[in-house]
Amino acid sequence: MKLIESHGLTLGYGQVKVLRDVSFAIERGEIVTVVGPNGSGKSSLLRALIGALKPVAGTVSRANGLRIGYVPQKLQIDATLPMTVKRFLNLPRRQKAAECDAALTRAGVPELAGTQMASLSGGQFQRVLLARALLGTPDILILDEATQGLDQPGAAAFYRQIEDVRRELNLAVLMVSHDLHVVMAASDRVLCLNGHICCEGTPEIVADAPEYRALFGTGTQGTLALYRHDHDHAHDHSHDHGSIH
């Protein structure tokens, strides 16, 4: 079932077009990652898909009653403000205690409920934002550079948590990320943007695409070798699909 779908989507600010002619769909249960250089339209695409940015042209359709959980790139909280994680999860409206506990457990930080927000590490803070996005059991989880500022082991652990959440809740995951090495192993499908969709498909197909290599070099090839080794037994490559535009 398609949760969100766009047809011929063109986005811009004033006279400046940042993304053109994007046709895209995401289904329940899949993890799709959007990659691309700075200014390629990644965050704009997310904003349009959730309804925060009006298209210049084209359409976005969402399934009826679609519940979206959103993890922002960063969130500023006044360090002098005394606020526990539990209190943070109850803003702007009160949640059931059991739902807060379940969300923190799914985010991998059940022990943080009574901790002050100001004393959290970067990784803990992102897990709390993930827990907040999981309140109300969303159909799709959208993450905009949610691991920015984390080191590579921290980012890898965060993505493993996302995979666990996807398995447990059977939700869709749409991520924008710069962590190419981890993303390739964590995604079912990769969408590479540079003002338009320049290539898309399984991680293997995208990493081999000339457009992708022109943007990012061949630095992810080593990771892809590991990816292939770990996943070969699960994949029948005759069923791989993808396209280059």
Image (cartoon, rainbow, N blue to C red):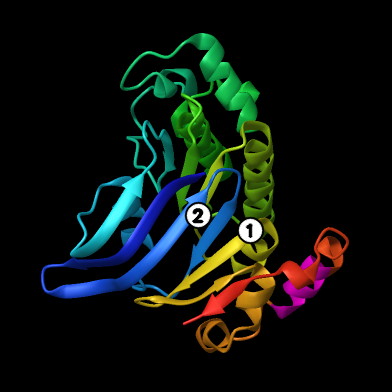
Left or right for 180, reference 2: right
The kind of residue tagged 1 is Ser
Q: Which residue is mark 1?
A: 187
Find residue 104 and report its image quarter. Answer: top right
Q: Return the disc, 2 or 1, that comes first in the chain's sequence.
A: 2
How many labels, in total?
Answer: 2
Above or below residue 232? Residue 138 is above
Q: How busy is the neighbourhood of tag 1: few (under 14 within 10 Å), some, or many (20 plus)?
A: many
Q: CA separation, marks 2 and 1?
A: 9 Å
Q: Residue furthest right?
A: 233
Instruction: Let me know if residue 172 appears in the view.
Output: yes
CB under 8 Å between callouts 2 and 1? yes
Residue reaching furthest to the top: 97
Point out which mark residue 178 bears. none
Q: Which residue is mark 2?
A: 175
Badge 2 element: strand
Residue stretch in magenta: 221-228
Is 180 included in the stretch rendered in magenta? Answer: no
Percent x, y for residue 216? 55, 82
Indicate whether 3 appears above or below 10.
above
Which residue appears at 59% of the width and 69% of the height? Answer: 201
Q: In front: 169, or 105?
A: 169
Q: What amino acid is found at the position of numbered circle 2 in the picture? A: Met
